[in-house]
Amino acid sequence: MRLQSDVPGNVFTFVGSPVTGPVTLDFAAGYNLVGVPFTSEGDYDARSFAEALRLKVGAPDIERGPVLSILRWAGVYSFWLRDNPDSRIFDIERSLGYFVRLTQAVLSFTP
């Protein structure tokens, strides 16, 4: 978080509710920073997440699907690339954020 001024007492307060179920995601063309907080272990890996987005838009195969890459940082970078769909397949985890790069918008996707 980057702020233009100091916060009194350097204390941040966040108000909200935990995510308890599926959330519909809208992706724009280009890079999207997303988290999928409700997945169970093993629900998605990088390739199956790209495949689910491919199915949403009706692309004929993953090589022509909308996902170009999925990147994550978990101490080291991990990445999945459409041009090499079997490379670095990693689990999509609840506690991490991902940069998902798409060639087109994908709206109303519910993982």
Image (cartoon, helix red, strand yellow):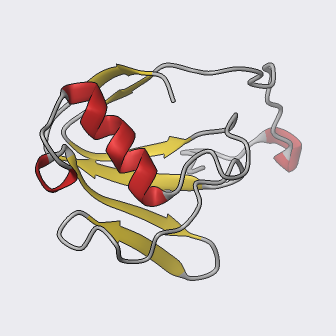
Residue 3, horizontal then vertical, whole percent: 58, 46
Question: 51 or 68, which is in the foreground?
Answer: 51
Q: Is residue 65 left or right of residue 97?
A: left
Residue drawn at x 28%, y 32% is 55
* Residue 51 sits above or below residue 16 on the image: below
Q: Residue furthest bottom?
A: 76
Residue 103, horizontal then vertical, whole percent: 14, 45
Q: Residue furthest front?
A: 60
Count of numbered marks: 0
Question: 90 or 18, which is in the foreground?
Answer: 90
* Residue 21 sits above or below residue 58 on the image: above
Q: Is residue 60 left or right of residue 77?
A: left
Residue 110, horizontal then vertical, whole percent: 48, 22
Residue drawn at x 81%, y 39% is 12
Residue 17, horizontal then vertical, whole percent: 81, 19
Residue drawn at x 67%, y 39% is 39
* Residue 93 sits above or below residue 79 on the image: above
Location of residue 68 (image quadrant): bottom left
Residue drawn at x 20%, y 28% is 57
* Residue 45 sits above or below residue 43 on the image: below
Q: Is residue 50 left or right of residue 23?
A: left
